[in-house]
Structures are given as C-alpha cells and as structure tokens.
Image (cartoon, rainbow, N blue to C red):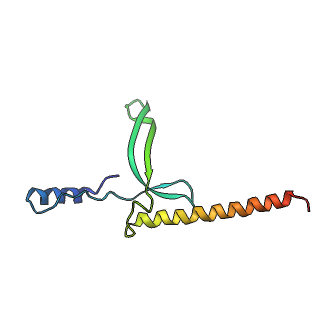
Amino acid sequence: MYPAFPIVAANQVLAAFGSAMILGEPAPLALFIWGPSRVLPVRVNSVSVTEQAFDTNLNPILAKADLSLKVLTYRELETTNPAYWVYMASFVQKEVMAAMSTVQSASAIRGMVPF
C-alpha cells in the first residue's frame, strides 16, 4: 500500500537540498485475488481494522477488517505497468468464461427442446 521507505527517505533528502522534484513515489502493485481466474490490480482506498477480542495480555485475537478497493483498468494504467497486463489477462479470462457459459447455456437449451 505504501512506497518503500528507502525511496521516500532518499527523495526527502534530495528535496531538502533542492535537487529533486516533488513526485509521488509509486506504490507497490496490489492484487485482489478471489480465485485462480480472477486476479485484478487494485488501489486500496481505505483500511479499517476493529479489534474485537483480546487475550490476557491484551493482544488482539479476533479482529474485523473493512477494505475499500478500486479496480484499476486498462484506461488508468500505462502499458509499461505490470498491473496493465494483469488487468488484460483478467479481461481476456472474463470473455473466455462468458463464451463458455453461452455455449453451455445453448447446449442446455438444445437438450431441453424436443426434436
């Protein structure tokens, strides 16, 4: 979710000496994986963790996490970004699954109609 600390620190030092432009450091690639054929690049908009139960040392042992994610599409990504190709692979996979579903539905309908 965050850029690597050494990059941030180096940019701060360069900026302090006036030799760096202020640019946003790139965040690491975050992927939402919800099955072998559903992997999407996402931007994490928010994370909220609510600790619900604790052990005797007050360490949390049960927590609820709420995430807000935005799927990054080919329109928002440069072709040089690996996330672009992750999205495109998911896009192709979705079309393949839709075509397979159409064929299976047509076969099921054909099997129900008496000839």
Specify the farthest residue to the right. Answer: 115
Of 43 and 47, the residue lying toward us: 43
Please give the name of the residue rendered at 8% of the width and 59% of the height, measured from the top-left corner.
17
Residue 41 falls in which quadrant of the image?
bottom left
How many numbered discs? Answer: 0
Q: Give percent across and percent down for residue 6.
A: 22, 59
Residue 107 falls in which quadrant of the image?
bottom right
Please give the name of the residue rendered at 43% of the width and 48% of the height, measured from the top-left corner.
69
Please give the name of the residue rendered at 45% of the width and 59% of the height, measured from the top-left corner.
73
Residue 47 falls in which quadrant of the image?
top left
In the visual, does 66 lie left or right of 25? right
Q: Give percent across and percent down for residue 27.
A: 32, 57
Q: Give percent across and percent down for residue 14.
A: 13, 60
Specify the farthest residue to the left. Answer: 17
Specify the farthest residue to the bottom. Answer: 80
In the visual, does 23 lie left or right of 28? left
Q: Quadrant of the C terminus?
A: bottom right
Please give the name of the residue rendered at 29% of the width and 56% of the height, measured from the top-left corner.
3
In the visual, does 29 lie left or right of 100? left
